[in-house]
Image (spheres, grey):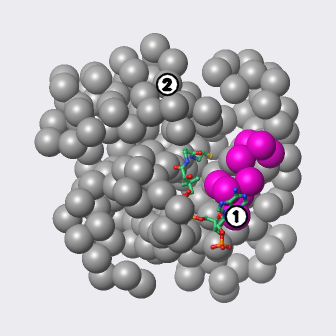
Amino acid sequence: MDSKITFKKLDKENYEILKEWWHSERVKQFWDNSKEMEEDVDNYVLKGQKSYYDYYIGLYDGVPYALVMTSEQTEDDYYEYYKEYLSKTGKTYAIDFMIGNDDFVGKHLSSITLRTFVEEYSDEEADRFIIDPEFDNEVAFRCYKGAGFVDVDEYIVKDGFFKGKKLHLMIRGREREKNVPPEER
Ligand SMILES: CC(C)(COP(=O)(O)OP(=O)(O)OC[C@H]1O[C@@H](n2cnc3c(N)ncnc32)[C@H](O)[C@@H]1OP(=O)(O)O)[C@@H](O)C(=O)NCCC(=O)NCCS
């Protein structure tokens, strides 16, 4: 692990930076920056409201450079395509990820960043993470493979911001999951 990589919950301090990343042409190609998402992050940071997502800023040696969003997927409330991939032994989280800071793009930092995030994730009961890059997003796919995610399925989004896009469905466990036979996961 790279000890220079740390994470903190998104707060007002990094909110403007995040908004810049969010609107950059590079990120916009693959990112849901719909009005609803904008409102969600505004409410989360500025009004302290609860959201479907938790937002974390990645810092490299103290410099903000990455965003990780998590959303817990439960038996009662899960994104429809994830149903058969929910963990049976612990909690499942879906992840969205970007390297937002242009100075840190293309430096082979993405896999180690995501790997660090997953391995250090604060919810001890989490033992399954799901991520789903577009087929068109080869760099993200390579990043997630490098972070230990396994490509297990694919789907075409039926509605919403990514309607019509074909996505990989990738999963990753944590140490605890290694002891559970695959058929029980
Ligand atoms: C996806 C993203 C996180 C990757 O970070 P990055 O800094 O661009 O990529 P890295 O330098 O860490 O490289 C990641 C891997 O992609 C490979 N790669 C780089 N450019 C590539 C290209 N054009 N085609 C294929 N693979 C490429 C790298 O070689 C590396 O693989 P390796 O470690 O096996 O050699 C970043 O580009 C990003 O945030 N993009 C915008 C938002 C986004 O797409 N988020 C993902 C939504 S699912």
Q: Residue furthest top?
A: 35
Give the residues in magenta.
134-142
Of the image marks 2 and 1, the number of the one nearer the N terminus? 2
Report x, y in % for residue 122: 35, 64
Instruction: Assign a secondary structure to mark 2.
Output: loop
Cβ at disc 1 under 8 Å from ligand 1: yes
User: Residue 75 occupies which quadrant of the picture?
Assistant: top right
User: Residue 67 vs residue 129: left or right?
Assistant: left
**Front in this rendered view, residue 152 or 134:** 134
Residue 48 belongs to the span the image colors magenta: no
On-image quarter of the N terminus: bottom left
User: Residue 28 occupies which quadrant of the picture?
Assistant: top right
- In this orientation, does residue 181 appear? yes
Circle number at residue 33 = 2
Compared to 51, does 14 lie above or below? below
Compared to 95, does 45 lie above or below? above
Instruction: Assign a secondary structure to mark 1.
Output: helix
Which residue is located at x 53 percent, y 38 percent?
Answer: 26
Compared to 123, does 76 lie above or below? above
On-image quarter of the C terminus: bottom right
Report x, y in % for residue 38: 39, 21
Report x, y in % for residue 139: 67, 56
User: Residue 128 occupies which quadrant of the picture?
Assistant: bottom right
User: Residue 66 vs residue 165: left or right?
Assistant: left
Compared to 129, does 68 lie above or below? above
Residue 135 belongs to the span the image colors magenta: yes
Q: Quadrant of ligand 1?
A: bottom right
Report x, y in % for residue 78: 63, 37
The amino acid type, in three-letter code, at marker 2 is Asn
Q: Are marks 2 and 1 in contact (CB under 8 Å)?
A: no
Which residue is located at x 43 percent, y 28 percent?
Answer: 23
Circle number at residue 142 = 1
